[in-house]
Amino acid sequence: MSVFSKQRGTLLSVADGRAIPLSEVPDEAFSSGMLGTGFAVEPVKGTIYSPVDGMVEGVTDSRHAYSIRSDDGLDVLVHIGVDTVKLGGEGFLPLVDEGDRVSAGDAIARADLAAIRAAGCRTVTPVLVANGEGLENVKFKLGNVTGGKSTVMLYKKGAEPKPKGHN
C-alpha cells in the first residue's frame, strides 16, 4: 500500500436517538449545507458525545456548540439544538474545555432536553464538517443510533489540495 493511499474515516453519533439527513434540520443554515456537510441526531437522552478523536478548539459562551479538530484534520461542529444560543447557556453543562483532548465516544456535554423544549427550541443536534471539500465517497448510516458508538458518517479523505501557485 502506498503512503499516498486515501485515509478512511468515520464520525460517530453524538447522542442516543435517530440520525437524520441535514436536509431535515428545521434551520436553513444547516439544512442547505452552507455551514458544511454532515448529519443531525434527534436525541432521546441528554448526554452528547464527541464524534471524533481530536482536540476541542472551542466551546461557545452559550455552551450549546462545540468545535473539535479531528486527528485527520476535519473541523467538526457539534451544535446542540436549533436556536439554542438564545438560552444563554441555560440547560447545558459542558464536560470539556477548549484545549482538551477527546476520543470518539467521550461525553462532551449534558443537555436538559426538557428545558430546551420548554423554552421553545428544537433539540435536533447538527454535526457538521466545515472543511469537508476534500472528502470523497461520503456515506451516511441514518436511523436509530447509540451515542458515542454508532457510526453515522463514513468518508475517504482525498489528497490534500496543493497551495495555489505550485505545480
Image (cartoon, rainbow, N blue to C red):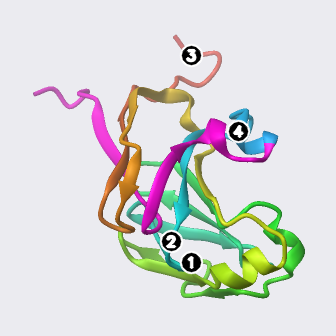
Q: Position of residue 39 (x, y in %)?
A: 54, 45
Identify residue for label 4.
31
| Picture residue at 70% right of the left edge, 38% below the top | 31
Mark 1 element type: loop
* Foreground label between 3 and 1: 1
Question: Which residue has dot 1 on it?
Answer: 99
Label whose residue precedes the other's in the sequence (1 or 4): 4
Is residue 132 among what the camera can see? Answer: yes
For the residue pair 21 and 100, the one nearer the viewer reads as: 21
Mark 3 or 2, which is nearer the eye?
Answer: 2
Q: Residue 88, how many percent across, how many down?
A: 86, 81
Q: CA distance from mark 3 to mark 1?
A: 33 Å
Q: Is residue 58 above or below residue 145?
A: below
Dot 2 or dot 1: first in sequence order is 2
Q: Earlier in the sequence, mark 3 or mark 1?
A: 1
> The disc labelled 2 sits on which kind of residue?
Val
- Disc 3 marks a residue whose amino acid type is His
Image location (x, y in percent) of residue 109: 56, 81
Quarter residue 33 falls in: top right
Report which residue position mark 3 lands on. Answer: 166
Judge whether residue 159 is colored magenta. no
Q: Does the residue at mark 3 contact the one at mark 1 (Cβ under 8 Å)?
A: no
Read off the residue under disc 2. 44
Magenta stretch: give its range. 1-27
Q: Is residue 13 left or right of 165 when viewed as pictured? A: left
